[in-house]
Image (tube, rainbow, N blue to C red):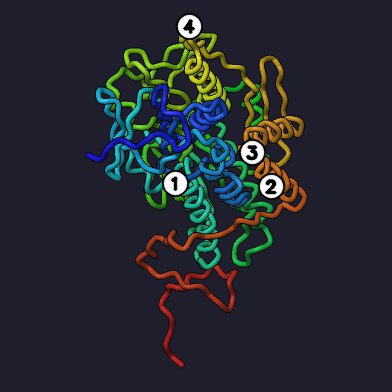
Amino acid sequence: MPAADPPPSGSATSGPRIVVLGAGFGGLEVARALGAAGVPATVVDQRNHHLFQPLLYQVATAALSATDVAEPIRRILAKYPSVRVVFGEVKRVEHDRKRLLLTCGKEIAYDILVLATGATHGYFGHDEWARFAPGLKSIEDARTIRSRLLLAFERAERESYPDEQRRLTTIAVVGGGPTGVEMAGAIAELSRFALARDFRNIDPITTRVLLIEAGPRLLGTFSQEASDYARARLERLGVAVRLGTVVSDIAESSIEVAGVREPVGLVIWAAGVRVSPLAAQLGVPTDRAGRIPVAPDLSVPGLEGVYALGDIASSPGEDGRPLPGLAQVAKQQGVHLGRELARRNEAVGDTALQPFRYESRGNAAIVGRHAAVFEHGRHRLSGFVAWIAWAIVHVYLLVGFQHRLTVSVQWLWRYLTYERGARLIAEDVVEAPLPAQPRLVNAANPASSRSEAEPQSTAP
């Protein structure tokens, strides 16, 4: 086994070896706080970029480009000489030996380990659905969804059969949380505004968007008023909202809901998440969602020197209930833990970490063009004012000023013109095989719905 990696060059070698696993909102803030204090730390991530996930759905629906919501980790941490970045995927955590084993064969030793690896898609025991119903957790996911979505319209355009056109332009979104609501609204707007004048054989305005939620209402963590408002706005956009319905099967060209199978052109999964499998390697109890219960100071009980935050951690709020898996929660946890670890590194006396206290900046979800819901304590907003509040919160959370300015200009341009500039189909997203019976496009009359597969007379 190769020797453990050295500490960051140019940094002090005294003090514990701190390793931050994951450069999401939480892990990145831990590293920044440690770097600002000059404390040596190593950040390990399997991607070379920090991703702003709350805006990822806009990449998937062609409103923003991937570079608008991602920033290289090294660029973000470049001004902190004491922080080292390692690009690699962790295969195993061996806490008894205080080391991480990477898939490349390298190992990284630690004294303090901060777990901030986030979560991935969860299909409730039906992982086979993943190939037909992509989720949205990475740039690759957004790129795949955008390509499949646009490809469905392109295939419908060259299709002669009305039933097949209807199938291809039926998009199902599974999950009525903020991601599902935002995705359904964005797809409805994309088809009704941005694509409306671009096709000749189909009318994108007739696109059917299905939003399927197993619970009794949308946006379950919001108030009933916000849920009702979101449903009404989505239905005004033409979204068919189905509540209290459970998905029982997903196939390549159909979805089965409440025992009824319906043809669809694309299914998008926004119903569940699964915590990083690294959590299970620590040998500590986890909750039903696979999260690691942590103490008020974000330490993992029973594992000295291990801390967890963000989606991988079950951290109690003031009401005793676990804090939600939001970007602002992870960001605040990262700032707190980073500062506390830096303070303890300099402390001579008391080295106990102070408990973390979450201060909500409000819950927000966009429902469509100049329409959103925003709640902060007793304050509840909806409509255009809530949309402005949503924009301010999300722009504030963006990492760099350059991205804040770029995204703000993109939003303003899209608001004024209804234009979507990132409508690219990736070359490696291939079409599904054609049906056994050929469907030919009638080039002379694209609008014709006559079956081109019927036998044709060969008589002169």
Inter-mark Cα distance, 3 to 2: 31 Å
Mark 1 or mark 3: name the one nearer the start of the chain: 3
| Residue that label 4 marks | 349
Which amino acid type is marked by label 3?
Answer: Glu
Residue at 62%, 19% (x, y): give it.
Answer: 360
Q: Which of marks 3 and 2 is in front?
A: 2
Mark 2 or mark 1: name the one nearer the start of the chain: 1
Which amino acid type is marked by label 2?
Answer: Thr
Residue at 59%, 40% (x, y): give it.
Answer: 55
Residue 237's image quarter? top right
Inter-mark Cα distance, 1 to 4: 66 Å
Residue 386 locus on image (x, y percent): 72, 30
Which amino acid type is marked by label 1?
Answer: Glu
Quarter occupied by the N terminus: top left
Q: How crowded is mark 2: few (under 14 residues within 10 Å), some or many (20 or more)?
A: few
Residue at 50%, 63% (x, y): give it.
Answer: 155
Residue 422 locus on image (x, y percent): 61, 56
- Residue 165 seen in render: no
Judging from the image, what secondary structure is the residue with disc 1 in? Answer: strand
Inter-mark Cα distance, 1 to 3: 20 Å
| Residue that label 1 marks | 262
Labelled disc at residue 235: 3
Determine whether, in the image, residue 316 is placed left or right of residue 397: left
Q: How crowded is mark 1: few (under 14 residues within 10 Å), some or many (20 or more)?
A: some
